[in-house]
Image (tube, rainbow, N blue to C red):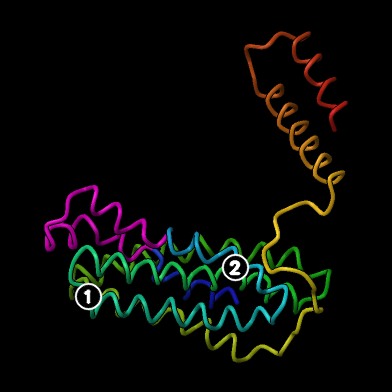
Amino acid sequence: MCIGQVGNLLPHVTLSANLAQHLMPEWGLSAAEGGLMASGYAFGYMLAVPVLTTLTDRIDARIVLLWGSIVSGLATAAFGIFAQGFWSATAIWSLAGLGFAGAYMPGLKALTDRLPAGDTSRAVTLYTSSFSVGVGLSFLVAQLIADRWGWRIAFLVTGFGPVAMVIACLLMREQRPAPKAGRLLNFAPSSPTARRSVTSSATARTASSFTASAPGWSGSGRSSLRTRARRLG
């Protein structure tokens, strides 16, 4: 899974690594246009991750991870083949971000669902730490290939990275989550009492954190605010 995660991250910053040196001069983009194009990845991720992550509570996370990895890899390769300017590049890169939304947190769920309780902590640590390794390799590989063979080849090569996670998904055993009723996305607390409890607890944590880190507050001021925070919590 860690190797698959590194492969999934190989496309992650391919655009950012080649934006200033290759893409902006070739397409005549301004700094604002370059920034908007690069942010398409985060925009696609932002739109998709609440749905895809929640979906792993209803279907096997392996399925979400598999298709997310496929979309991420295909979109990255498509960028190298079809991107011709600001609009096409932004649209394709947004699709790549959408794919990554199904390839990161669902991967963590797919991993922990298949491990005994005693192995979960170590596995999560290794899986999440592979993020930094994957991003670093993405920068390195994308820049080296682009400098030698061109940026389009860099996108094509890094687009093959998610194949590692696709293989990992195909080797996993099936693991269906327990059936759940209700809407797929439901952000409201279950009752008015729970809503008040959530609000009070959040306020208490915020106040306690603030008093601990505010150097300009006197001792009596901190003590008073902590007392009120404890009453809220």
Q: Main secondary structure of the magenta part?
A: helix
Vertical side of 63 occupied by 90: above or below: above
Label at residue 51:
2
Describe the element under mark 1 as helix, strand or loop: helix
Disc 1: CA contacts within 10 A as few (<14), some (14-19) or many (>=20): many
Disc 2: CA contacts within 10 A as few (<14), some (14-19) or many (>=20): some
Q: Residue 180, how many percent across, how many down?
A: 79, 74
Amino acid type, residue under disc 2 in the picture: Val
Q: Residue 121, how many percent across, how many down?
A: 75, 63
Q: Residue 171, how many percent across, how many down?
A: 62, 91
Residue where numbered disc 1 is placed: 152
Task: Write down the quadrant of residue 144 in the picture.
Answer: bottom left
Describe the element under mark 2 as helix, strand or loop: helix
Image quadrant holding the C terminus, namely top right
Q: Does the magenta stretch include residue 96?
A: no
What segment is highlighted magenta in the picture?
13-42
Foreground: 39 or 174? 39
